[in-house]
Amino acid sequence: MSQNDNGACNSYDPSKCPTVSEMLSRLGDKWTVLVIMMLRDGPKRFSELKRDVVGISQRMLTLTLRALERDGVVRRTVFTTVPPSVEYELTDLGQSFAEPIVSLGSWVFSNHMTIQKARREFDARHQDGRAGQKLVRIG
Amino acid sequence: MSQNDNGACNSYDPSKCPTVSEMLSRLGDKWTVLVIMMLRDGPKRFSELKRDVVGISQRMLTLTLRALERDGVVRRTVFTTVPPSVEYELTDLGQSFAEPIVSLGSWVFSNHMTIQKARREFDARHQDGRAGQKLVRIG
DNA sequence: CAGAATCCCCCCGGATACTG
DNA sequence: CAGTATCCGGGGGGATTCTG
């Protein structure tokens, strides 16, 4: 985070608003977006999420859900049955948050061909002789 | 990433589309969004960006810009002057990408108060007695 | 079933110094 | 000015094991 420990936000300068950059970087854990998209259809149980979000570990699922719950985006409901089950669902805040999230995901999905093409061209342009400035191997 | 190494995307399942999750996780480096928002107003030079994106190191700025250039989102133009200057600007693809990005940033900005309140309540709820399931128990 | 706890590796990313 | 190269510490996150 930035210098400011309290989340005070005076100007519309994201870099000066800790909460904004925190929330944005939360998307980057790469699981948050997927989890939120999964929850759009309605409540889901822990094991459902774990099954549907391919590749996520239970640890990361737990951490992701906990963070979202803390932000008031997700509501957690425990059913004291045997065996126990827990349901997760988007709050109203979460629903409204899901909108820009989905827009973003949709954009990426519908443009990923273009992106991949651009990447291939970039790589071809930079690996052979000319001006080959490799920084770090990407991908 | 997932099992699939090539970026093939068959179904509308983000978790099965490497490119989608890669692009989404790129937002999480926490600089990408800020850089893109800065470039919305028009072309900017390297040093301008470094000055405006508060807290970013030249290393991270370079890496972020390089990645965005590779994705075809940003165009890099070198002017062989003395001293040299380099301009960065959004491509058409980048402009369209900026839209959902901005939506996201705006949402976070206009809801950060609610989020902070939710966090405080969550923390208060979980540190004292009540069903206190704290994740990390220190000491 | 839904987690919590522990171990441990990797890489992100900051700081610093050097170039064309 | 606009990078590049190198060192290095902290933490993100996977795999595994244990519990109510």
Image (cartoon, coloured by chain):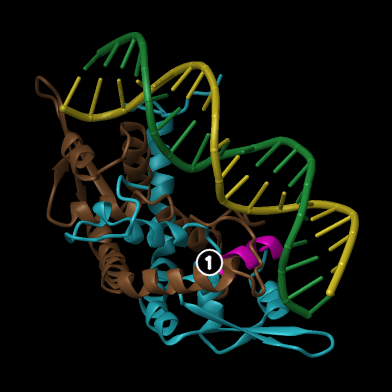
Chain colours: A brown, B cyan, C yellow, D green
Label 1: state its secondary structure. Answer: helix
Between A56 and A80, the residue placed more toward the observer is: A56
Task: Locate the C terminus of chain B and report the quarter of the image it occupies.
Answer: top right
Q: Is residue B62 magenta?
A: yes
Between B87 and A105, the residue placed more toward the observer is: B87
Left or right: residue A54 compared with residue C15: left
- How many numbered marks, from 0 up? 1
Q: Is residue A46 above or below residue A102?
A: above
Residue at point 46%, 74% (across, down): A121
Residue at point 28%, 53% (across, down): A34
Left or right: residue A75 compared with residue A127: left
Q: Quadrant of residue B56?
A: bottom right
Magenta region, main secondary structure: helix
How far across and down, in percent of the image, does residue B45 sit?
68, 83
Left or right: residue A26 compared with residue C7: left
Chain to which the residue tagged by mark 1 belongs? B
Q: Quadrant of residue B127?
A: top left
Between A76 and C17, the residue placed more toward the observer is: C17
Q: Is residue B58 magenta?
A: yes
Q: Which residues are magenta?
A: B56-67
Residue ID for mark 1: B67
How far across and down, in percent of the image, does residue B87 sit?
65, 85
